[in-house]
Amino acid sequence: MEREVYEEIQKLAPFVLRAHLVETGRQRLLQNRNKLAFLLVTEDLSENSRDEALKEFPCPIYQALTSEEVESLFNFHGTKMVGFRRNALSGNVQRCLKGCHIVAKPLAEARIPDNPAVVLFGCGAAGSAHAHEWEAAGVRVVGLVEETQEKASACASALKEALGHDVEGSVEPEALLKSLNPVFVDVSLPTELHYAGCHLALRLGCHVLCEKPFLDEVKASHKSLLKQRESLVGLAARHKRLLGTHGPEAVRGMASGKVFYQVATA
């Protein structure tokens, strides 16, 4: 299979280089990570470096080829990580790598009941996108919370049309959770409300997946952030609930009872 991958990419490499779609160098890759369609890491990349990449990059990651093969394809000496900018050509390369997709090892696991449901805390651009991810993962979106009833009702109507079933909109998160009793809560509120949203959901026994940044790192002091993180991680542990942050495959992972992007306490 490796040889087939190499030969397929070899046909595309000259066009990719001519279009300037390739990024290398860890710092440059990190600076442009939100512009990447995917990341290719070599088979001879260390396990620690691979695991770090899985945590740091929001795009899909594929592991294939050796650094020597990458050099022969793209003329980058010693390179073990190559980023591809979004483009139709990059999509063609990505299809060549479809059998080489890797994900992080789960950091925490839990048993999920049949026919689980999720409530969205926040239904802006991120929350709406997450709704479709949850449904694709087999989790029914049953409710959402917004700052005004007008907005909650509008979002609920939009999701009903998009998903094909009723979604309840509310401005009362605690009442909604007690009424609907979801397995999951997806927190996509303004960052300064992440702590309160996560705390409420965990306290009421839900697994929680939170949008990044996890907490308000701009306004809160380091000491305050650390205290909040420890509080939420401790609450999740006491209630035996999953607490994670969004990233590649995060929704699908949590839907199956696995957390790939866990909240650090230091």
Image (tube, helix red, strand yellow):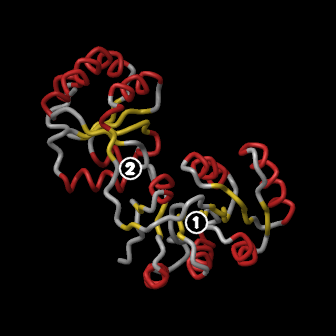
| Rendered residue at 42%/38% (across/down) | 36
Q: Secondary structure at mark 2?
A: loop
Density class for disc 1 (Cα within 10 Å; few <14, some 14-19, many ≥20) is many
| Rendered residue at 68%/62% (across/down) | 122
**Left-right relation of 30 to 164:** left
Q: In 3D space, how far apart are the residues under numbered discs 1 and 2 (Cα atoms)?
A: 24 Å
Residue 242, image x, y percentages: 46, 70
**Left-right relation of 23 to 180:** left
| Rendered residue at 47%/23% (across/down) | 88
Number of numbered labels in the structure image: 2
Q: Secondary structure at mark 1?
A: strand
Residue nearest the viewer, comparing 18 with 211: 211
Read off the residue under disc 2: 57
Say which quarter of the image contains residue 143: bottom right
Density class for disc 2 (Cα within 10 Å; few <14, some 14-19, many ≥20) is some
| Rendered residue at 39%/48% (across/down) | 31
Residue nearest the viewer, comparing 128 with 83: 128
**Which residue in the rendered view is the most extreme toward the right?**
150
Say which quarter of the image contains residue 167: bottom right
Q: Amino acid at mark 1?
A: Phe
Quadrant where the C terminus sits is: bottom left
Residue 229, image x, y percentages: 46, 78
**Left-right relation of 53 to 154:** left
Q: Is residue 147 above or below residue 140?
A: below
Q: Is residue 172 above or below residue 17?
A: below
**Which residue in the rendered view is the most extreme toward the front?**
114
Read off the residue under disc 1: 184
Q: Amino acid at mark 2?
A: Phe
Q: Is residue 52 above or below residue 87?
A: below
Residue nearest the viewer, comparing 179 with 56: 179
Q: First in sequence: mark 1 or mark 2?
A: 2
